[in-house]
Amino acid sequence: MFGPDDAFLITILNLLRRLPIYPMFGRGLMRLQPVYVEDVAEAIARIIERAEAQPGIFECGGPRAYSYEEFVGVVARQAGLAPILIPIPFVVWRALAWASEILPDPLLTRNQVELMEIDTVSSPEMPGFVELGISPHSVEAMLQEMLSKYG
């Protein structure tokens, strides 16, 4: 999930701005389908309004699935950046996370690394935004809006 001042998209953007060489999780092949926070809030409101006796499970993902490498590239291009993307093996990330967790305010946790090792996309077989009548916002559109407001 992403939105203004989030811990995901904004963190990637800030790192891209600071680092000419961007370290990727693994080879950047993990798939993700970022979803805008306000779209999820609208989905929750519509599900509550339904008041069905048997509410189902909804999987709400953004309008596009990306590989992690593609996603970082999209964020960089939207911000006018052209970093060099370097794959870093997950074993290195796990070691960094373990060391970071010793600190009072860890920059990276083992749980975060574990999440970056698996695909996080919605299943086409599950109900989602379409069944709720919602057209989700794209990362590109929302990032442009966020960049124009917050720089």
Image (cartoon, rainbow, N blue to C red):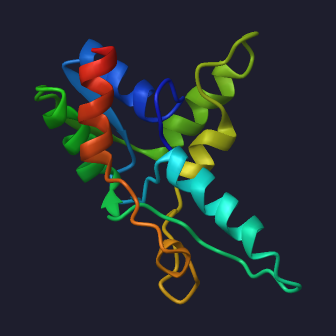
Across and down, in percent, residue 7 comes to 54, 29
Q: How many marks?
A: 0
Task: Give how far across and how far down residue 14 sits, in percent.
Answer: 35, 19
Q: Is residue 20 left or right of residue 8?
A: left
- In the displayed structure image, the side of residue 88 where residue 58 appears, left or right: right
Extreme residue toward the bottom, this view: 125
Decide which of 85, 56 is in the foreground and name it. 56
The answer to whether residue 115 is above or below residue 125 is above
Given residues 78 and 36, the one toward you in this image is 36
Q: Residue furthest front?
A: 49
**Residue 125 versus residue 47: which sits nearer the camera?**
47
The residue positioned 50% from the left and 71% from the top of the image is: 129
Question: Which residue corresponds to the image point at 68% horizontal and 60% vertical from the top-left?
Answer: 44
Give the residue at x 64% y 74%.
58
Q: Residue at x 53, y 61 (%)?
A: 118
The quarter of the picture where the C terminus appears is: top left
Horizontal side of 96 relative to 106 (left or right) equals left
Q: Quadrant of residue 98?
A: top right
**Quadrant in the picture for residue 73:** top left
Classify residue 63 by image quadrant. bottom left
Looking at the picture, tell me which residue is in the foreground, 100 or 49.
Answer: 49
Measuring from the top left, give residue 144's x and y in whole percent.
23, 34
